[in-house]
Amino acid sequence: MYGGGYIGGEETLQANQDDPIALAEFEARIAAGDKIEPKDWMPADYRKQLVRMIEQHAHSEVIGALPEGTWITRAPGFRRKLALMAKVQDEMGHAQLLYSAAETLGKSREAMINDLINGKSKYSNVFNYPAFTWADVAVIGWLVDGAAIVNQVANSKGSYGPYVRALERICYEESFHLKQGHDNVVFLATGTEMQRTMLQEALNRWWQPLMHFFGPSDTMSVHTEKLMRWKVKMASNDDMRQQFISMYVPKIWELGLTLPDNELKRNPLTGKWAFADPDWNLFFEVIKGNGPLNKERLAVRRTAEERGRWVREALLKADMKYTVPFA
Amino acid sequence: MQDNIKQPLQQFILQLADNLLVMGHRNSEWTGLGPIIEEDIAFASIAQDQVGQAWNLYQLLESEFGFAHPDQVAFTRNEKEFYSSHLVEQPTGEYDFSLARHYLYDLAQLIRYEMLSRSSYEPLAKLAKKFHGEVKYHVFHAQTWMKQLMDGNEVSKARMQSAVNDVFPFAMGVFESVDGEEALIAEGIFEGESALKDAWMQQVGAQLLEWGYSLPQLAQPVLGGGKGYHSEYLQPLLDEMGEVFRLDPSAEW
């Protein structure tokens, strides 16, 4: 997973404050497909947007580890247990990569994590929903990861070198997560009555959060144009949502599962999918912190940070010696 | 294989596997909650190795000793039929406790696998060689952290010393012999818990002193796990581990 998707909380961009000549050169480089590296000149808005985006992506990995993480100890059988452990571990690894990428833009990991736990910085809304059963883990592993991949593959073609390189590695690992999630879903879908019911119920629960995942319709979204020109935002919310639906809905139906949206239908002429508008009021409520689990997720993270503080402080000792590895 | 060897040998393997499974399960509880992200990742790796090793051993019990499928063996037994030590079933606690346990347990595993790689029982020797390669890194990781937190500040020193003191009696309880161990020793299958414990004590003592720890007072080892007697912590752990699997143990998950 996990990151990407629409997280919200864009800061106000400050148009036209940059040196116009440097800006023109910068834009020409991006248009030519160059990658921007940490020491290169960049507009203040570009830096600000990227820090926000990469940081929130990293937070999404960290918080995203929680709903699945609580199922590691309950995963049924060795195969599932080992796969889930490896999967959630990867997500924490992604967080590590992403915090490092964001740090190249001048914000420390500690400052980012502080902003996460004090609520200033957001993470993907989708993790504010509960994973009630083992089937929720299957649906998250397949479809939430699937949705995240749509977003991450798009962003991996972006303009900021460190983020792009992190995303390339992340996408590679994500493709395994997707297989893991799909395999899990297939076993439940082709299993006993109890397993199928469990799966269908989880799918019903997750469909709306998945439709929310890419954010509100482009018609509701702000200042996308400049970010797309700078290759910070690489695809529109609506395009990504369409891509996700066209990739996954047929596969879901093939497994004999249903989706809680009677309007889902592919237009054979345009290839576009029609679907019921999800409840955007709910979406904005969750972003504001009023989702089912926002408070709990942050509380867990805050507790983890507090419990681990003594370790981090011990590492910060000014005259710390280099520890020679043991032979 | 004669019964006087087969019985203790399968019990020995089962005990080893149960310890690994429960230890891996506990270590996996750090995933997403570690003091720094790098430690989340490290504990998750170690946990995967341990659960993977347990799986290999249950597979050996299935193929060579006629046990049920590894998932059945691991996910459906209750505490009375589990032979893991009290050390591994203790809750993760804080990072200091988990780290001290990780160090003391994995160092014992490293020496155990060194011994078992010389075992006359070929299938076990083969596995032990493979596991040894993994545990080498566990020990390296544990040593690095044991040392750097003792080199840290007053808080970390005090916490780590106290964690070592707390864990030590449990750690000594890992060396619980199976009934009939003398036959395993006589056959060159395993050199025995007592020899293992001596080697471990020597290394632990030297290393702790070198890093500035005081040696914990020698307390009575906490035994009983190897005979199926457990603390209040194991059954809830097993309930949790089997929660989904037991919904329908005949289903394919």
Image (tube, rainbow, N blue to C red):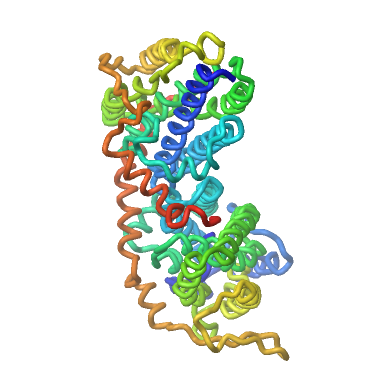
Q: Which of the pair B172/A284 is nearer the observer? A: B172
Give how far across and how far down residue A145 sits, in percent: 56, 63
Res A51 visible:
no
Q: Quadrant of the C terminus of chain A?
A: top right
Residue at image coords 40%, 30%: B83
Residue at image coords 34%, 22%: B173
The residue sitting at the front extreme is B3
Res A114 visible:
yes
Give how far across and how far down residue A114 sits, in percent: 35, 54
Q: Which quadrant of the figure has residue B237? A: top left
Q: Which of the pair A241/B60 is nearer the observer? A: B60
Give how far across and how far down residue B111 sits, in percent: 50, 18
Q: Which of the pair A127/A238 is nearer the observer? A: A127
Residue at image coords 55%, 15%: B189
Give how far across and how far down residue A38 sits, in percent: 58, 53
Q: Which quadrant of the figure has residue B40? A: top left
